[in-house]
Amino acid sequence: MRISVVHPRELGPSETARWRALQGADPALDNPFLSPEFTIETGRVREQARVAVLTDGADVVGFFPFERHQLGIGRPIAAGLTDAQGMIHAKDIEFSLHELMKACGLAVFEFDHLLAGQPLVPAKHTRHPSPVIDLSDGYAAYVETLKQVSGKTYKSTAYKSRKLGRDFGELRHDYGIRDQAVLRVLTDWKTDQYRRTGRADRFSRPWITKLVENLLEIDSEHFGGSLDMVYVGDRPVAGHFGLRTKTTLAGWFPAYDTAFAKYSPGLIHHLAMAERAAEAGIRLIDMGRGEKEYKEKLKTGELWVTEGRIARATPGAGVHWLVRVPVRKARGTVLANSMLRETADLALKTYGRIRTSLAS
């Protein structure tokens, strides 16, 4: 096994084609965050982006996208943004995890959305559900399932959709939008949401804004940005920007205008998005790891992702353990306990209200 490490911009057409072939050969890898286009676009805005290329004889058998930071700390590509992480590999691959880490110059690789079943998953890790919407039998079949498992949600959302139309005008849903101005409306809503809820604003980081703008421009058979918006008349109400492969849509940035909050615009939008996505050939919507009420109401099942770290015996790994591991364990304890989670969420929202009032 030979391992070479390159920047994503150094990948040529043959490597990209091989990456896509490996991804297409395993349904578990059918996620746009694992597509070559996502890593290449991230490399345009993240100099620390790298790809380890694993070759066995004359065949490329794996790609490991990652970021290398100071002290040899490794993180997934576009760390902090991705809902699916891991290696793109041949099913029968055999390699030394220690040698991979060494070749990549990593003391530690820290992850929080690594796909379960990956050859990278260490013995010690935690597993977390990633809710999904199964559209493999079409939107009508999904609606029938939703009526059975979450009938009250479906009925109330349909009622609120009709009421929204009566109160403000006919509803319109635009799917597959390529307009940067519409994207900015969505990201402005998202920034407001981050501030209201006490979270860090991802769009305050220029590289994230640029990455999302670049991804919106891509629309190929195998990969693309996916922007859609629900309107009443000409007024935008709720929307979403995510990424897609040919058959999987990854939820990423949903948001809505809070002026319409009483109508549950997020649920109205998600049902509209699911219908149009199914028409476009999407078979699965991965809503991503996270304890969100709307995900529980809309899901038909779950995939599994893992959180943990891989480490070599180096000083950098020791420093990382002292700084990160206790914090991650404390965070995991809070998220696993509904009472602690709700208390923490309330504290963040209170902080957000104070921060917003001071800024106004």
Image: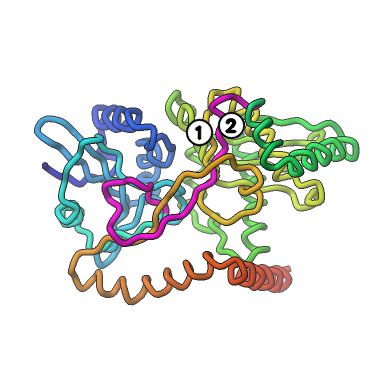
Q: Residue at x 47, y 67 (%)?
A: 332
Q: Is residue 246 magenta?
A: no
Q: Which residues are magenta?
A: 113-139
- The residue tagged 1 is 217
60, 126: nearer the viewer = 126
Q: Does 347 appear above or below 204? A: below
Q: Say which element carries label 1.
A: loop
**Quadrant where the image shows the N terminus:** top left
Q: Is residue 130 magenta?
A: yes
Q: How crowded is the residue under tag 2: few (<14 C-alpha within 10 Å), some, or many (20+)?
A: some
Return the disc, 2 or 1, that comes first in the chain's sequence.
2
Q: How many marks?
A: 2
The label shown at residue 178 is 2
Left or right of 279 on screen, residue 27: left
**CB of mark 2 within 8 Å of CB of mark 1?**
yes
Whole-percent x, y for residue 271 in the image: 68, 36
